Amino acid sequence: MKQLVLAGLLGWSIMNGQAQTPKTYTSSELLQQLKKLNVLGSVLYVAAHPDDENTRLMTYLANEKLYRTGYLSLTRGDGGQNLIGDDQGIDLGLIRTQELLAARRIDGAEQFFTRAYDFGYSKSPEEAMRIWGHDEILSDVVWVIRKFRPDVIICRFPTTGEGGHGHHTASAILAEEAYDAAADTTRFPEHFKHGVGTWRATRLLWNTFNFGGANTQRADQFKVDVGAYNPLLGKSYGEIAAQSRSQHKSQGFGVPAQRGSILEYFKTLKGTAPVSDLMDGVNIGWSRLPYLPNAAAYTKTIDSLIAVFDHQQPSNIALPLAQLASRWEPFKITNSYGPGATSDLQYVNQKINSANELIAASLGLFAEATAVNQLNVRGDTMRLNLNLSVRNSNLVTKVTGNVIGKLVYFDSIAPNTGYSKPLNWPTSGPIGGVSNPYWITNGLKEGRFHVTRQDLIGLPEENEWMAYFSFDLGNHRVYIARPIRYKYTDPVKGELYQPIQVVSEVFIKASPSLVLFNTNIKKQQKKISIEAQFNKKVQDTVRVRMYEQVATGTRLERAFTEVANMPLTVAKGDKKRFELSLNEPKNARVGTVTLMHPMLEAPSLLIPQEAAMRKISYDHIPDIYYPYVDAVKLVNVDLKTEGKQVGYIVGAGDKVPEALEQMGYKVTLLKQADIVPGNLKQFDAIITGVRAYNTNEWMNDVYEVLMDYVKEGGSMVVQYNTSNQIGPIKAKISPYPFNISRSRITDETAAVSFLQPTNDALNYPNKISAADFEGWVQERSIYHADKIDSNYQSILSMADPGEKADNGSLIISNYGKGKFVYTGLVFFRELPAGVPGAYRLMANLIAPRRKYSK
């Protein structure tokens, strides 16, 4: 059975454990945590995406009011744009999950999610809940409420639509419904067999706002000043909140620190309205647990420890705190609440774990479990080291380390001395399997992740590998938990920690990930390279093949293409590359995509279908590895192109250059130094990547050179940029003025009208029709042009359901001998997805202006 650690049960300790480097605590921070032991109130903040949360308010609640504070984000931000790389979809959701966890480590709150997949911008809550599955996501929100049991629930957005995004409004509607459903024994009764009971929060509030052109704050609303300064932490809550919010780096959300008074406003949606405090009517002290013997005395005991706390000798609190935790121990939750249960005994579990962590920190006890290897092959032995040092006490005895029942003993402990004990564990043991983020293991089911285990729903991630340490302090036994991490030393960055992975015996991946067959070219043959990395020594007959799923009557069968079938001897870590020649798909219709998968077979190896391994690596988050089923998209398209050489100015990151190469262009990535008149003459077109003008401050310096390039006959295609407080446009873009708006078309099936049917963009070299807009994914277009100069022609018109048509998705102007194009059409999504019509339209935008074109 897998070992699970819920952040809500370990409190601040697991928050520490998720950092790449274990956190140590100053005496002031220890005092802050000691004060928190006396507070039993809790608040849950609810919104839709990473970055929606009000970090100022959450920082204040967690650190000034000392409440247990959580953030429930309905989605992981999978459908957004990415400012730091070309990761999209599930990969982006993995990144934003870690960015949220980094933010919570700073502001002191906890993180939760539902199963909802962020499918991109939605203009209505009805669409959002229809795609997600209303009842399923409502169940998730109710589950988190029943498990977290907040006294106060706060929404970021209203149910009435002022939040703009349909996901935003849906988050408030679901929170309001869940407020009542969580207290109803007839709603989602299946929860009760998993250790929760019903729960009724005291109130549901809307945290009103003044941003994005909407001011929903009113003078008569309840107000809280969250801008106080915390001398123990050495920062104001506005400063801490800025650090927290700035962890959303993939969204470019770095913000300045705020100092001084900051008012937050609230409107009551359910329950009793607060009068003088958010917790009006809520008992947040130990006396809320009258069934706990001497509950009222615990406040006095903790107050006395606070009063005598010595910053020079924080270990003085360890023994009396251990005595206090021992008095709570008999009242830990050991079984299910059942329907209708209203017990607050969960606080006993939380406070015991927090006290134990506080004891260890006050003693200067450093305990960790580290793996020798980051990637550990399934079926092999994982080599671990359990490291220990007690730096501030001589009272600790009988230390034991426990990894899934395998014990290591530290018999004699001298103060301020380092100890290390080896421990080996077979990765084919109780955990088994290959490591995978739990929510993507079973893939997507409609608009949500398919998670089959109720106990995992809500968790930001699953900690599969944990080490548990225990030690005696006087007559009391103290327990702490630590995630097992891979530790290594980088010559530049120093000592680093990363998560460990259990991986398959072989990684197998094909490249490129997309192959384009042009029906206008006879007898095409494309090369696919299949790379196998062997993670263990192999001496066997190896068979490498590609297969595709083909329909045969009512069945799906695999059609195989042989690559290799040979005896092979390889050492651990060896890589072998196999080449496969593919002819154009014989049975594929024009405008279709065929998926082909690489696979490897050997009698001595157990290789899952998910044999490819993806690594996501950025300095601000832990490494992310996950296995997946690799596929090569074979796109069969009727495509004509004009021109051969394309210069590409990289922006925030996208996969358009690879798609252009498949179209037959030679693509050169351009930096600022490359953009000089003599160099640009070689290119038939210059294309700027998504957000290029947001991310490259130097674009203004090359404006004249680019415009001269167009004037002399070049084609310039500018993909979408944003213009807002996060990423303002500081450079000139175009020969004639236009603004970049927030307008977008979110319905990928929206009808497209041709406003200029004779324009080259729709005719040369490919004749564009409505069929070219079939099969688009996620959305049509974003960040349209508006207030457009008369020198431009708007080529397309489209509209989301119930809205008026928008003409700013594609504008083109002749300039000198050349042409300038601005487009919000999401080529960065459609080209990697293999949408044939997107390739045909892009070829037209690249093509040089014809002399007779208007």
Image (tube, rainbow, N blue to C red):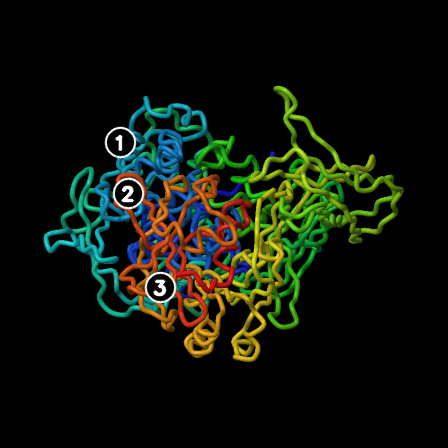
Split into 4 quadrants, where in the image is the N terminus? top right
Q: Secondary structure at mark 2?
A: helix
Q: Nearer the viewer, residue 516 or 614?
A: 516
Q: Quadrant of residue 335?
A: top left
Sequence-wise, which precedes: disc 2 or disc 1?
2
Q: Secondary structure at mark 3?
A: loop
The residue identified by callout 1 is 180
Give residue 169's mark: 2
Q: Quadrant of residue 255?
A: bottom left
Amino acid carrying label 3: it is Ile
Amino acid carrying label 2: it is Thr
Q: Position of residue 6 (x, y in %)?
A: 48, 43
Q: Position of residue 100 (x, y in %)?
A: 43, 53
Sequence-wise, which precedes: disc 1 or disc 3?
1
The reply, left or right, for residue 571 in relation to residue 739 is right
The residue identified by callout 3 is 726
Q: Nearer the viewer, residue 494 or 139?
A: 139
Give residue 78's mark: none
Q: Are marks 1 and 3 in contact (CB under 8 Å)?
A: no
Q: Residue at x 42, y 39 (%)?
A: 116
The reply, left or right, for residue 427 in relation to residue 137 is right
Q: How far is disc 2 from disc 1 in space, using C-alphas? A: 18 Å
> Is the residue marked by circle 2 packed among few (<14), some (14-19), or many (20+) residues within 10 Å?
many
> Is the residue marked by circle 1 packed among few (<14), some (14-19), or many (20+) residues within 10 Å?
some
Q: Position of residue 27 (x, y in %)?
A: 43, 66
Sequence-wise, which precedes: disc 2 or disc 3?
2
Amino acid carrying label 1: it is Asp
Above or below, 269 relative to 96: above
